[in-house]
Image: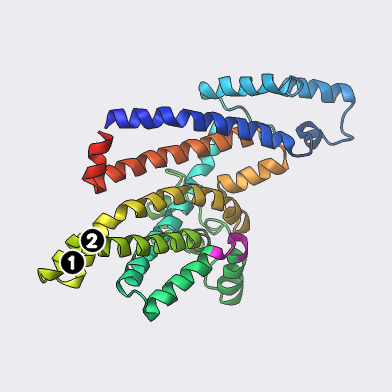
């Protein structure tokens, strides 16, 4: 097990290196000077601008700036925000629980609905349910998050008044930050269930908007994987023994169909984080997606470079967890990896 983890970490090093290059180069291709944005084009003399650029290290050659960034990153120093003057690491982890909570609830929504829908579609192949659910999955997969999010706001917040429009919790709740996960902090706060319910209502629309595309992918993969497993000889043997349809589907077929489903769920984590950038912007969710968008607008180089690198690290960790789940679900894969 330890050898597998070490091998995965070693093979991830080129990925990290590529991410640092992409994050460093792409932000510098965006027009605009962070120094001029900070002080204004008419706010200082050329001498002051040159001095500020030197203090930020922007007067050095790009290759020198890159290797300086890479060396600092290896020591855990991802720099300081040009705008807020706070360290990138502290700002990232202050906002990461909000994004993680949104991504987790969105993924939970997609899994709890996607797997049963795919399972039912496979069990009722070529029926009305199959065509209806898979057609709906195709529509869900094709909808852009920004459009779907606005539709949800217009219908459920503006039209019906059921859910809040934006934010994580109403302003009249004063919940102390303990874990950073608002559903947990509100539950143990003085307001208790009332604050928890308010925070949960704020999560509903962003989670649906973020989880719709993963839901469609999980449903389609579950259906395909189940149909493949249901053709196997041991399934026909189980049916011949007189086992109930429910036991055949859940006890035999689903467990063996889980490996590709877990693969899709693991890959969806990256989709959830990148999708959170649009979702958090639409719903004014105070997470890392909205933070990165504001940093791009402000040309805050350290935040963008460090934020992208930390997101890549989180995705690699999730992929390691997915590999461990492979070994738990399928003993054959565990023997190959050991």
Q: What SS does tag 1 mark?
A: helix
Q: For the residues labelled 2 and 1, say whether their Cβ atoms are less than 8 Å apart.
A: yes
Q: Is residue 310 left or right of residue 61?
A: left
Task: Tell me residue 55's x, y (percent).
Answer: 73, 21
Which quarter of the rendering shows the N terminus?
Answer: top left
Q: Residue at x 36, y 65 (%)?
A: 223
What residue does disc 2 label?
Answer: 232
Looking at the image, residue 281 sits to the left or right of residue 204; the answer is right
Residue neighbourhood size for the residue with mark 1, other residues' Cα within 10 Å, grouped as few (<14), some (14–19), many (≥20) = few
On screen, residue 199 above or below 273? below
Look at the image and give the residue range highlighted in magenta: 142-147
Residue 332 can be seen, yes or no: yes
Find out whether residue 288 is within the magenta segment.
no
For residue 200, side relative to residue 7 (left or right)? right
In the rendered image, which quarter contains the C terminus?
A: top left
Residue 214 place in picture, x, y as percent: 46, 58
**Viewer-side residue, 110 vs 39:** 110
Label 2 sits on a secondary structure element that is: loop
Per the image, is 145 magenta?
yes
Corner quadrant of residue 20: top right
Callout 2: 10 Å neighbours few (<14), some, many (20+)? few
């Amino acid at each position: 097990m330890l050898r597998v983890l070490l091998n995965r970490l070693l093979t991830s090093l080129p990925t990290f290196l590529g991410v640092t290059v992409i994050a460093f180069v792409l932000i510098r291709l965006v027009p605009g000077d962070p120094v001029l944005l900070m002080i204004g084009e008419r706010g200082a003399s050329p001498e002051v601008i040159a001095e500020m650029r030197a203090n930020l290290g922007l007067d050095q050659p790009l290759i020198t700036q890159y290797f300086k960034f890479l060396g600092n990153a290896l020591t855990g120093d991802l720099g300081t925000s040009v705008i807020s003057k706070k360290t990138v690491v502290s700002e990232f982890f202050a906002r990461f629980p909000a994004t993680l909570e949104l991504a987790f609830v969105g993924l939970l929504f997609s899994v709890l609905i996607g797997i049963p829908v795919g399972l039912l579609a496979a069990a009722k192949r070529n029926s009305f349910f199959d065509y209806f659910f898979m057609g709906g999955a195709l529509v869900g997969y094709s909808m852009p998050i920004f459009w779907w999010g606005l539709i949800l706001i217009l219908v459920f917040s503006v039209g019906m008044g059921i859910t809040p429009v934006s934010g994580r919790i109403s302003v009249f709740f004063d919940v102390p930050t303990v874990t950073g996960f608002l559903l947990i902090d509100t539950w143990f706060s003085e307001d208790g269930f009332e604050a928890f319910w308010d925070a949960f209502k704020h999560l509903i629309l962003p989670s649906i908007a973020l989880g719709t595309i993963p839901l469609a992918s999980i449903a389609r993969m579950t259906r395909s994987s189940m149909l493949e497993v249901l053709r196997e000889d041991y399934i026909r043997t189980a049916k011949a023994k007189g086992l109930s349809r429910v036991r055949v589907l859940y006890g035999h077929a689903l467990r063996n169909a889980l490996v590709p489903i877990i693969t899709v769920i693991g890959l969806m984590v990256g989709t959830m984080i990148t999708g959170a950038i649009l979702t958090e912007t639409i719903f004014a969710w105070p997470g890392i997606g909205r933070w990165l968008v504001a940093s791009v607008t402000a040309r805050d180089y350290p935040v963008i470079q460090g934020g992208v690198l930390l997101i890549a690290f989180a995705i690699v960790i999730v992929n390691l967890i997915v590999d461990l789940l492979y070994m738990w679900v399928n003993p054959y894969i565990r023997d190959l990896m050991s």
